[in-house]
Image (tube, rainbow, N blue to C red):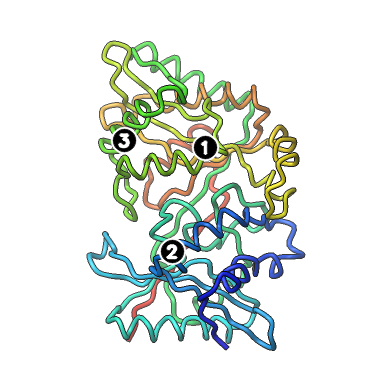
Amino acid sequence: MIKVVTTKRDLKQFIRFPNTLYEEDPHYVPPLFFIVYKELKKVVLKDKTYTALLVVNNQQIVGRMLYTIDKSKHQDRDVGYFSFYDMIHDIKVSQALFDYMTRDMRDKNITHIEGTFAPYDPDTRRGILVKGFDDAPVIFTSYNKPYYQVHLETLGFNKVLDTVSLKADVTPETKKRVSTISRFFQRNHNVRMDYLDFNQLQRDMEDVQTVLSQADTEIIYQDTPDMAMIERAARQLKLFINPKMILIARENDTNRPVAFCLILPDYHQVFKKMKGKLKIITFLKERKHITRARGMMQYVVPEYQNSGLLGMMFDTIYNVFQEAGITDFEAGTIIEDNHKSIDAFQKFGGEIKKVYRIYGKDLD
């Protein structure tokens, strides 16, 4: 039986369902409940721009899904997007979820659906995991059972695109490689690396927006963030930020910003200990033992691309990693066709470890 989430109680059940589904899975990391609840309460119960579904069987929740309609930039049409897609290994449960969504989409003249992808959260939890099940997920990435792919393809979904995640060990060999590139770059350019400065946050955010607006990227699922989005992200991520892992490259002569990168410590290692609850003592204690980091963003303005600037940036970051005890680094999800970014990271010792897939389906 399909149940539409309309109450706070329903929403809490929606959020907590994966804790039961993945109870025996050693790689599952419960998200912080209060953060997800606040996020979904606004779009599901207050704004009602998203519909949240539960599948109930014998008074037990066996599946869930969230969906909405949004404008697709790359298709130039409205598309139905689904996310928070989780269910037991029973194709009938997936069928029930998509039957409900499909009926709603047809009533609203929507002819195409895609997922998993949340337009309000375009750069995280993007696509279902189809490769890399033997490794724990890092912060703001998806994790799911291998049978999710089987369900979607059985129900007629086809691959739209893959995003890949590259992983690199923080080793002396890697450090030597990026240091060599960094020295080459510095012989030919007068650029410095600045850490994020909370005392100059407005200035730094403006410089980040400048770099983002100029950088030539191949990300097709989102527009360049405006200042309001950057400020909102800064507030939301403040709890997880190490300012030394956020770099802005500036020309010394002009102070012009020419590159930016955002790397977060992998707080999933902390969340796993907290089991979805905010335990301050546990949080403060366990964050000292984080050994992984995730690269969320890296952007370089066109004239500095392929110049070695990324080498200088990662040389600086690797120094910070050594100070912080970080031994594993995973790059943020990169569109499979973004060969420029993939090749650049592979030069620093990275290799593809995980693949996430966005699926699509035309509605008859």
- Which residue is painted at 43% across and 36% down in the image? 344
> Which tag is nearer the camera, tag 3 or tag 2?
2
**Residue picked out by circle 1:** 238
Assess disc 1: are there few (<14), some (14-19) or many (≥20) residues with their C-alpha within 10 Å of its C-alpha.
few
Assess disc 3: are there few (<14), some (14-19) or many (≥20) residues with their C-alpha within 10 Å of its C-alpha.
some
Residue 209, which numbered label? 3
Q: Nearer the viewer, residue 76 or 130?
A: 76
- Callout 3: SS: helix
- Which residue is painted at 72% across and 49% down in the image? 274
Question: Marks 3 and 1, Cα distance to the nearest angstrom?
Answer: 17 Å
* Earlier residue among tags 3 and 2: 2
Residue 151, which numbered label? none
> Which tag is nearer the camera, tag 3 or tag 1?
1
- Which residue is painted at 48% across and 70% down in the image? 66
Quarter where residue 117 is shown: bottom left
* Earlier residue among tags 3 and 1: 3
**Residue picked out by circle 2:** 43
- Callout 3 amino acid: Gln
Residue 148, compared with residue 99, is above or below; it is: above
Q: Position of residue 60 (x, y in %)?
A: 69, 81
Question: Marks 2 and 1, Cα distance to the nearest angstrom?
Answer: 22 Å
- Quadrant of the rendering where the N terminus is positioned: bottom right
Residue 176, compared with residue 351, is above or below; it is: above
Question: Marks 3 and 2, Cα distance to the nearest angstrom?
Answer: 26 Å
- Callout 1 amino acid: Lys
Assess disc 2: are there few (<14), some (14-19) or many (≥20) residues with their C-alpha within 10 Å of its C-alpha.
some
